[in-house]
């Protein structure tokens, strides 16, 4: 058994500034659990085009607001208590709220190494 705290993660390379927010990689591949758990912040008024080709992801909202949009143009408002699930390696837009950050608990399978970062500057979807 072990206990890990957000503040402790911030002192390591498991704390990732990913372009439009931050990710505390609380569990990673090296922990041997078979999945990753992250505390993810999506900054207000940001838009990220994301695509996880190698991982399935589920995100549970614990605070704030935002939205996720699939490639067919379906927009889903996300708020506290909502979960969205990318069960088909879904390419998607993730947006922070207009007035507040979106705060998520993100779970990845298979696990992340922990230092992956999005590249949001080239106009294509960021992927890893």
Image (spheres, helix red, strand yellow):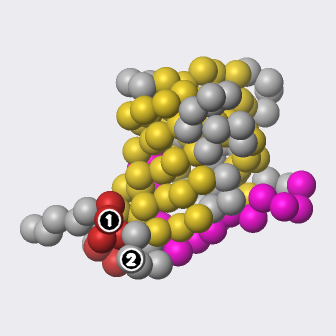
* Residue at image mark 1: 7
Judging from the image, what secondary structure is the residue with disc 1 in?
helix
Please give the name of the residue rendered at 76% of the width and 47% of the height, measured from the top-left corner.
Answer: 49
Which residue is located at x 78 percent, y 58 percent?
A: 120
Instruction: Using the image, tell me which numbered label, if any, was put on residue 11.
Output: 2
Name the one closer to the observer, 16 or 72: 16
Q: Secondary structure at mark 2?
A: loop
Up-down: is 48 above or below 112?
above
- Which of 111/62 is in front? 62
Callouts 1 and 2 close, C-beta under 8 Å? yes
CA gap, disc 1 and disc 2? 7 Å
Query: From this viewpoint, is residue 28 visible?
Result: no
> Quarter of the image containing the N terminus?
bottom left
Q: Residue at x 37, y 55 (%)?
A: 37
Which residue is situated farthest in the front direction here? Answer: 99
Q: Is residue 37 left or right of residue 122?
A: left
Nearer to me, 48 or 111: 48
**Pointer 1: residues within 10 angstroms few (<14), some, or many (20+)?**
few
For the C terminus, the image quarter is bottom right
**Image: magenta residue range:** 106-123
Depth check: give the residue in front, 16 or 34: 16
Q: Quadrant of residue 12?
A: bottom left
Q: Does the image show residue 40? A: yes
**Residue drawn at 40 percent across, 70 percent down:** 10
Note whether 29 is above or below 76 in the view shown. below
């Amino acid at each position: 058994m072990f206990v890990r705290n957000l503040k402790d993660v911030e002192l390591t390379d498991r704390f990732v500034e990913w372009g439009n927010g931050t990710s505390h990689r609380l569990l990673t591949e090296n922990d041997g659990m078979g999945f990753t758990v992250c505390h993810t912040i999506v900054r207000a008024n940001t838009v990220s085009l994301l695509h996880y080709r190698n991982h399935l992801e589920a995100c549970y909202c614990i605070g704030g607001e935002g939205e996720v949009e699939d490639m067919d143009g379906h927009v889903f408002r996300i708020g506290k208590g909502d979960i969205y699930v990318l069960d088909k390696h879904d390419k998607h837009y993730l947006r922070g709220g207009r007035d507040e950050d979106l705060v998520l608990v993100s779970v990845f399978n298979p696990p992340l190494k922990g230092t992956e970062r999005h590249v949001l500057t080239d106009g294509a979807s960021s992927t890893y």
